[in-house]
């Protein structure tokens, strides 16, 4: 038998090596846990949940939400509003007949007819209000300002069956 390369190993030595490895790994883990415990983690209350927006192609409420979201962004309450985009959105979403009536309303009232205001809202919500005749009505609630001075305007947006806006009013068509 060759003494340099023994054919069998001593079981006691193997157990000692395994025990040493387990102890070393165990100490490493416990050191990491205590180090992690000392690191400050923010309170859960300060973490905000991710928001999501979803829609479905062909739904009246989604179409109106898309229009109002893009329109408010285009008009913006900042130094360089995009009037070209706002006009293109109107051409795409409004029926030609309603666009003419809206222009007349704006001239008479000195305000934006889509928003029924002279300024741009800070927030808006869009809610389905159901079928009306051959069309569909959607409620758009615009919030102007914030805090105690916030003012809300409720608009009733009527869509024809082909999903073009045919009216924006402050009262329901129902």
Image (tube, helix red, strand yellow):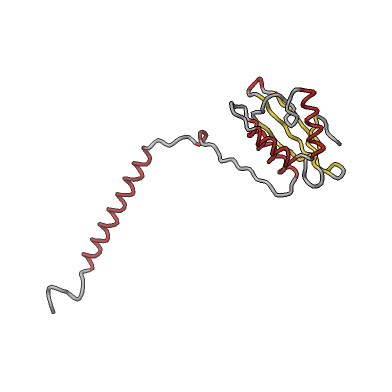
Q: Is residue 103 something that shows in the picture?
A: yes
Q: As displayed, is residue 16 above or below residue 80?
A: below
Left or right of 12 in this view: 109: right
Q: Based on the displayed image, in which of its 4 quarters is residue 111 positioned?
A: top right
Q: As displayed, is residue 127 above or below residue 56?
A: above
Residue 9 place in picture, x, y as percent? 21, 71
Out of 22 and 144, give the one closest to the viewer.
Answer: 144
Q: Residue at x 27, y 57 (%)?
A: 21
Q: Based on the displayed image, in which of its 4 quarters is residue 167 positioned?
A: top right
Q: Residue furthest top?
A: 149
Q: As displayed, is residue 19 above or below residue 76?
A: below
Q: Is residue 129 something that shows in the picture?
A: no
Left or right of 48 in this view: 156: right
Q: Based on the displayed image, in which of its 4 quarters is residue 122 positioned?
A: top right
Q: Residue at x 56, y 39 (%)?
A: 49
Q: Residue furthest left?
A: 3
Quadrant containing the C terminus is top right
The number of callouts visible is: 0
Q: Residue at x 20, y 69 (%)?
A: 10
Residue 28 place in picture, x, y as percent? 30, 49
Left or right of 141 in this view: 74: left
Residue 48 place in picture, x, y as percent? 54, 36
Out of 126 and 22, give the one closest to the viewer.
Answer: 126
Q: Residue at x 68, y 28 (%)?
A: 143
């Amino acid at each position: 038998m060759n003494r340099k390369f023994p054919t069998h190993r001593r079981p006691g030595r193997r157990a000692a090596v395994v025990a040493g490895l387990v102890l070393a790994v165990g100490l490493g883990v416990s050191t990491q846990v205590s180090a992690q415990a000392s690191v400050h983690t923010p309170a859960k209350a300060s973490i905000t949940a991710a928001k999501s927006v979803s829609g479905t192609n062909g739904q009246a409420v989604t179409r109106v939400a898309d229009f109002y979201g893009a329109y408010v962004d285009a008009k913006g309450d900042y130094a360089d509003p995009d009037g070209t985009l706002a006009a293109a959105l109107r051409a795409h979403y409004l029926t030609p007949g309603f666009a003419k009536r809206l222009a007349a309303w704006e001239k008479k009232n000195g305000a934006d007819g889509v928003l029924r205001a002279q300024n741009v809202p800070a927030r808006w919500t869009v809610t389905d209000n159901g079928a009306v005749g051959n069309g569909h009505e959607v409620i758009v609630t615009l919030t102007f300002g914030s805090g105690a001075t916030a003012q809300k305007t409720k608009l009733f947006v009527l869509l024809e069956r082909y999903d073009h806006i045919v009216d924006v009013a402050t009262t329901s068509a129902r």
